[in-house]
Image (cartoon, rainbow, N blue to C red):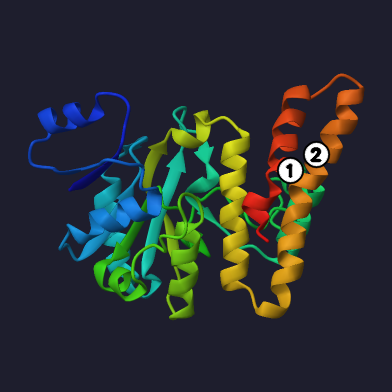
Amino acid sequence: MVVVDNVSTDDSVKAIAARFPDIRLIRSERNLGFATANNLAAKESTAEYLLLLNPDTVVLDGAIDRLLAFAREHPRAGIWGGRTVFADRSLNPASCWGRQTPWSLVCTATGLSSLLRGSSLFNPEGYGGWKRDCQREVDIVSGCFLLIRRELWDQLGGFDERFFVYGEDADLCLRARKLGYRPMITPEATIVHYGGASEKVRADKLVRLLTAKTMLIRQHWSPSRVGIGVRLLAAWPLSRLVAFSVLRCVGFKRDALSVWREVWRRKREWYGP
């Protein structure tokens, strides 16, 4: 196992070194970001498969062995993922995602994806209505729990390091699909992922997310559709800014308004020139 420490501010490095002396521990002097750190860790491995697993997870019931068995049963998938749950064992749907499309961006901008999360029609990126309770081909396997053959990883050149955080897993899966692979999810491999349950929505996080989504559109959409794609994406924060401005007039959502106002103020960071 390889662990890359991205300048943690607690005693986790000392704890890992003390409790797991056989682990290859790489200590970075700066925050490399998710993509670069995983690429660095992958270079230290010679295994046939690479497993990406977030530190804020708990592996349940032999999930890693089950995921590996699933991979060997479905080699043409190329990339495999499992089912993620919150600490209370309720479904965390973030184990996989659908790709961005003009329709999905319209649904996000209009709020339909949030209002109708259980609808596969109006929440296509979130695979609305699917409880992750069956094997299924997906567009994107989340990097929090992702298994990939070393051969394919090398063929793809690992993560694109232009993605600092968010989007690198989507880019990897979309590039694999272009080579004919079809990533899959299995409910037999389940982990607890705490991050999605506790992480607060902040302007910095949204700016990073929008930056990644803009990059994905520019890199994976046809040139003739990129313009409309980034404009549809920009309609999401703009619609939230307008909505929360109206709600503030009647005394609601003041904190949310300040977040979206800051995101819109920093539009150049995520929208680009």
| Side of 36 relative to 208 (left or right) | left
Place of residue 218 in the rendered image (x, y in percent of width and height, measured from the top left)? 61, 68
| Residue displayed at 31% across by 32% down | 8
| Secondary structure beneath label 2 | helix
| Residue displayed at 44% across by 47% down | 83
Residue type at mark 1?
Trp
Q: Nearer the viewer, mark 2 or mark 1?
A: 1
| Residue displayed at 35% across by 55% down | 36
* Label 1 sits on residue: 264
Place of residue 188 in the rendered image (x, y in percent of width and height, measured from the top left)? 37, 51
| Secondary structure beneath label 1 | helix
| Side of 213 relative to 40 (left or right) | right
Which of the 4 image quadrants contains residue 60?
top left
Whether residue 187 is visible here, answered yes or no, is no
Q: CA distance from mark 2 to mark 1?
A: 8 Å
* Label 2 sits on residue: 241
